[in-house]
Image: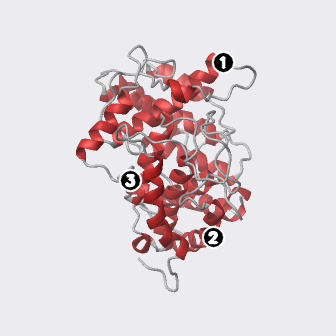
Amino acid sequence: MRRSGLVLPTWMDQLNRTLPDWLSQVAHLEGPGRYRFALDAYEPYDLDSSAMALNIVQTTGARRPDEADRQAWSDYLTSLQRESDGLMIDAGMERHIIAKEADKPTDTELANVRRWTTRNGLITVLGLGGRPRYPLRHDEAFRTPEAMIAYLEGLHWHNPWGAGSWAGAVIFFQHLNRVAGDDGAEAVIRAGVEWLLDRQEPARGGWSDGSEILPHVYVNGIFKVWIQLIPYVEFEVRYPEVVLDTCVDAWRESFALTGVPDACSLFDVALVADIALRFTDHRRAEIAELAAGSLPGFTPMLRADGAFSYGAAGSLASHGGLSLAPVKDQSDICGTAILCNALALVANLAGLRDELGWTPLTEWWLGL
């Protein structure tokens, strides 16, 4: 629905022409789903970039694959799974793990990258209509409800962004095992879901240890739980009015959402608000104004090559412990995926969805 007086900015209209061309340039001819991190990247394609690419495709409609290509894309990703533990291993990508104290990553650094890239890779497989080739049997693929609860209780909830990310991930790992035929996964899922719902805070709508937390960090924690659980398990959206109050506070008060915003924080607050507004009209007009006011903050990340970099200074130096391209004046696939998702959500909230023509992740991923 159009808001009175709001017109699609020229730069948004131009993205619909430049973005498909950029995405074609970072695609590799070897087969569907093979994308590199940037025009100038260290690898011809990699697991991380493949997962990011599907976000761009589903949101914007650029280079949408047919059924045969979707199957081939899914097959490429599941071919990276290791039978022993279900983790996805991309040897080329792993050459670029940032080791903090030595020439090669520690076992912990390697495991951390493999867990989150496996999570993203298998989310992508599900999004393509595929299934994991093997169940997950790594250390965070818990086999009992008691192990799941002990893990959730041990997370550092003074940082809901990090704790929410891993809380959502370990429950999602069990969904993957359920899809793979593990009859014991359901009880572990329910234990994790019930633990989270029992501890959701009615006063702010999310999760924490009760300490003072910046509003955008608090919202990011809600995002990390909702985005990983709503599509896959029975997870009730509670306290939507309170969540929207928290989103308004974050949008108005947090340094990460003013001026040139942090891309992740902008994506997170826009998605959380868009989800909550599917269940209430509370502060809808105010959210629309905040969303419209955030549009100029996207433009510093626009690059001349036709897409987005994660930050205003140029392509991303590190994504989750990986350095996949030199830092320079170019777009990167991580920044493009996050900011395209954010832009589709902001356009929807502001009343410019029809003019932009993109589909918010709330619908194509979460099914709301």
Residue drawn at x 61%, y 68% is: 294
Amino acid at circle 2: Pro
- Work out how far the residue at label 2 is from the one at label 1, CA to CA, in angstroms: 41 Å
Which residue in the structure is indicated by mark 3?
A: 58
Amino acid at circle 3: Gln
Which badge, 3 or 1, comes first in the chain's sequence?
3
Residue 194 seen anywhere in this rendered image of the structure: no
- Asked whether, in this view, residue 77 is left or right of residue 101, the answer is left
Percent of width and height locating residue 223: 54, 48
Percent of width and height locating residue 31: 35, 38
Residue 249: quadrant of the picture: bottom right
Task: Determine which of the numbered discs, if any, sits on residue 357 in the image.
Answer: none
Which badge, 2 or 1, comes first in the chain's sequence?
1
Which residue in the structure is indicated by mark 1?
A: 106
Percent of width and height locating residue 107: 62, 16
What is the secondary structure assignment of the residue under circle 1?
loop
